[in-house]
Image: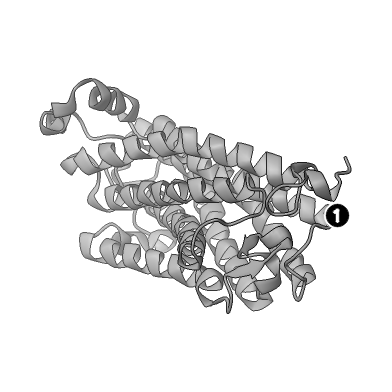
């Protein structure tokens, strides 16, 4: 749908110049904000109040994953303002850098925590052995805290494009300001982010395959986790794998070729979106839905999670009375 210069918005672009970017992405961000933020705040509260009912390490990883998702959704009001402008950033440059850094840091910290959770759950079901060599350390409080710190540092490293761009804001048509537009993208940093995601994705995939084989094989000698706990572990890792495959993989498959095609592109003006542009934009919308799906994984793989959420909403004093319940099946290393 064509638009004349006179009916364009502040940024000189009509939503119909690029409906995937100015309609689909804001719709996905609105959904992620409306559903993902309250769901992850509730999850965060449940994990904070769970005390000793969750394995110490798994509780720490789940809590940090929910925190990363909350941080991600808190950036969305700024991006919604930008895309509904359309393509005009009305805030200071420091806010542009901070919003971009928080967006990427939260995304890749969540990727790292999902990988840590998968490895931990795999080791708790398979028990001692070469394939579970990393899990005993990851189940201890000290190493788990170090792993969480490393995950956040990895997220900050993936936020480098937002922090290191020479000019976070670029002039656009009609006096608009563009925030972190593709002309400032760096292919090397994009390739590093893709490699980081690929490594985490392979860990989650390997953990699920290992779990599936362990649960399909006859029980070996020695104590084994109870059936519900083993199924809950497989459900959690399968859920994380599906989130990776549906929400995160499309974005990372397209990121490197898209950035390579955008290097040196001018930041101003409206231009026809190429097929790669449209696909990248749609993958960005899918990426934002990650924060909505993680709480669903908790609902189906952490015993009593739904009951605890309900108790939290109905009885504010629940946190001090819930320690008498049985340990949830998602406890890392529970037996």
Above or below for 124 versus 101 = above
For this orientation, the residue located farthest to the right is 2
Picture quadrant where residue 331 is located: top left
Local packing at callout 1 (Cα closer than 10 Å; few below 14, some 14-19, many 20+) is few
Figure quadrant of the C terminus = top left
Figure quadrant of the N terminus = top right
For this orientation, the residue located farthest to the top is 314
On the image, the x and y values in percent for residue 294 come to 46, 40
On the image, the x and y values in percent for residue 79 come to 55, 50
Picture quadrant where residue 88 is located: bottom right
In the picture, measured across the screen, residue 13 lies left or right of residue 249, that is: right
Residue at image mark 1: 272
Q: Which colouring convention does the figure follow?
A: one colour
- The residue at the point 16 percent across, 33 percent down is 319
Above or below for 263 versus 73 = below
From the viewer's side, name the closer residue of 309 and 103: 103
In the picture, measured across the screen, residue 211 lies left or right of residue 129, that is: right
From the viewer's side, name the closer residue of 261 and 177: 177
In the picture, measured across the screen, residue 217 lies left or right of residue 87, that is: left
- The residue at the point 34 percent across, 26 percent down is 306
- The residue at the point 40 percent across, 34 percent down is 39
Q: Is residue 198 visible?
A: yes
On the image, the x and y values in percent for residue 81 come to 56, 47
Q: How many marks?
A: 1
Q: Is residue 218 visible?
A: no
From the viewer's side, name the closer residue of 177 and 277: 177
Which element type, helix, strand or loop, lies under badge 1? loop
- The residue at the point 24 percent across, 27 percent down is 312
Picture quadrant where residue 219 is located: top left
Above or below for 53 versus 191 = above
For this orientation, the residue located farthest to the front is 6
From the viewer's side, name the closer residue of 291 and 128: 291
């Amino acid at each position: 749908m064509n638009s004349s210069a006179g009916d364009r918005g502040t940024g000189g672009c009509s939503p119909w110049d690029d409906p995937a970017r100015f309609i689909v992405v804001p719709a996905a961000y609105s959904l992620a904000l409306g559903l993902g933020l309250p769901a992850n705040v509730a999850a965060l509260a449940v994990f904070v109040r769970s005390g000793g009912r969750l394995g110490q390490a798994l509780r720490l990883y789940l809590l940090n994953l929910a925190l990363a998702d909350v941080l991600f959704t808190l950036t969305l009001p700024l991006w919604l303002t930008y895309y509904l402008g359309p393509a005009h950033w009305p805030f200071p440059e420091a806010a542009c850098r901070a919003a971009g850094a928080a967006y990427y840091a939260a995304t890749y910290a969540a990727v790292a925590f999902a990988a840590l959770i998968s490895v931990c759950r795999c080791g708790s079901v398979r028990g001692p052995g070469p394939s579970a060599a990393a899990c005993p350390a990851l189940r201890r409080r000290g190493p788990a805290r170090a792993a969480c710190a490393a995950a956040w540092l990895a997220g900050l490293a993936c936020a480098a494009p937002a922090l290191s761009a020479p000019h976070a804001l670029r002039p656009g048509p009609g006096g608009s300001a563009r925030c972190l537009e593709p002309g400032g993208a760096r292919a090397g940093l994009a390739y590093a982010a893709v490699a980081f995601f690929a490594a985490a994705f392979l860990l989650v995939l390997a953990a699920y395959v290992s779990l599936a084989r362990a649960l399909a094989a006859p029980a070996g000698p020695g104590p084994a986790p109870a059936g519900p706990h083993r199924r809950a572990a497989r459900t959690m890792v399968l859920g994380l794998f599906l989130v990776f495959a549906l929400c995160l993989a499309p974005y990372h498959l397209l990121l490197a070729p898209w950035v390579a095609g955008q290097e040196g592109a001018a930041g101003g003006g409206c231009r026809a979106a190429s097929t790669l542009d449209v696909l990248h934009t749609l993958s960005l919308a899918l990426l934002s839905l990650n924060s909505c799906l993680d709480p669903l994984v908790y609902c189906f793989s952490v015993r009593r999670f739904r009951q605890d959420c309900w108790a939290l909403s109905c009885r504010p004093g629940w946190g001090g009375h819930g320690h008498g319940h049985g340990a949830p099946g998602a406890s890392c290393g529970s037996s």
